[in-house]
Image: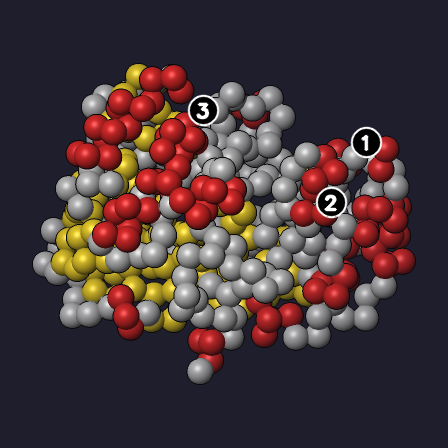
Amino acid sequence: MSQAPSKVVTKDNVGSILERALDAGQGILRLTPTWVPRSFLHPGRRLKLHPDDYYAFGAHRGGIDERWFASTTEAANEGREPDEGLSYIRFEGQRFLLRDAVEEAGARLIGQEMFGKYGRWPVYSKFFDNMGPIPHHMHQKHEHAKLTGQEGKPESYYFPPQLNNVDNNFPHTFMGLEPGTTKEQVRRCLENWHKGDNGILYLSRAYKLQRGTGWLIPPGVLHAPGSLLTYEPQWGSDVFGMFQNIVEGRYVPWDLLVKDVPPDKHQDLDYIIEQLDWEKNVDTHFKEHHYLEPIVDESQSGPGYTDRWVVYGRIDGEQLFSAKELTVEPGAKCTIRDPGASGWITVQGSGRIGPLRLQTPAMIRFGEEPDDEVFITYEAATAGYEVENTGTEPLVALRYFGPDVHENLPNVGDHRR
């Protein structure tokens, strides 16, 4: 583990070092941790960050409660660092932005089809870790996000057992609205924003979170994530609107409700409510349509290794992102072939991927660069890469993919078959 941040290579000089890194890693690139604070949340302290470093950005910025993976998406935080939310590639004591690398060699890194359509790696994932629940909120649909020059954000959840040794304060998530709820009831909640608890949770229902399961959440759907550490593959956007004004005694300012609303609509309650996907919020079979359990991919499993789908399904008919959990038993190795690039984070054990070492850290100092995260380029994924467990416990890793990658992606509900 490197003990100090590597030297940053500027965008204009990325080409040559990227070529060397691709050659040395056989198409697999080492990434460094990307930490993100949230001023309005309380860190859950399961990110393996050193206890002294949770406020490394300064107490005024809030505690670090997120680690982003293979991200080319900027965090939409007030007072943010210039590179906040962006992942770096590490090579030969230097580092450079994954975003710059994709701009430099997009076809090699993410495939010509994806690069041609989006011009970027259009997704990211994170660990999201809080002591308690967060406000009932939604992420805008594309039609609303584009009014502020942004993109909508569907997302997904998986609760990795390896990082959830404790539940913390509220391992339940409110999702959607109780069937039969009216828009007028939601409007009254917004009208009461400055009069104490606005009561939005009286209109919703909570689901107890279960380790090793997940959810698929479309844009425009209200949700108040609970206190299990969550792995979140999602679209490459950081838009949101908070609909709950007080959480565990903490006040949520109106600004966080209208952060991604056009300025002339900041007091327009009808418009704010219009952003919700009403039918999905009041769905009488919400869990049936959004709940996920792992599904073994038999085509990518064999003696000593198992590859499971943990995030799958489509949103409004579109395959936008997906994720898998690979487990390799001690002494075993396997060759994995994927039809697209992926961001990889190791959550248990040690070993190697291609020529690169893998080691799950017990604790990370802010600025350190452990050997637990990589980006598997399109070239490496389609050619096939070897994973070996060189340790004495299972080697477990999560990897997530971009849009339209898999022909055999399961649908929500297929775990019941």
Q: Amino acid at mark 1?
A: Pro
Label 2 – label 1 distance at C-alpha: 13 Å
Crowd class of label 2 (few under 14; some 14 to 19; many from 20; radius 10 Å): many
List x then y, in percent, for residue 213: 45, 65
Give the left or right position of residue 225, taking residue 331 as reference: right
Q: Which mark is residue 56?
A: 3
Label 1 CA crowd tier, 10 Å (few <14, some 14–19, many 20+): few
Q: How many marks?
A: 3
Query: Quarter-wise, where is residue 318 in the image?
Result: bottom right
The residue labelled by disc 2 is 144
Residue 31 placement: quadrant: top left
Q: Residue at x 48, y 32 (%)?
A: 85
Mark 3: amino acid: Ala
Foreground: disc 2 or disc 1: 2
Q: Is residue 93 visible?
A: yes
Pointer 2 with pointer 1, Cβ within 8 A: no
Q: At x 79% / y 35%, what residue is drawn?
A: 262
The residue sitting at 69% across, 42% down in the picture is 145
Element under label 2? Answer: helix
Which corner quadrant holds the C terminus? bottom left
What residue is disc 1 on? 263
Q: Residue furthest bottom?
A: 417
The correct choice, above or below, for 208 with respect to 259 in the image is below
How far across and down, in percent of the image, does residue 296 sit? Answer: 33, 71
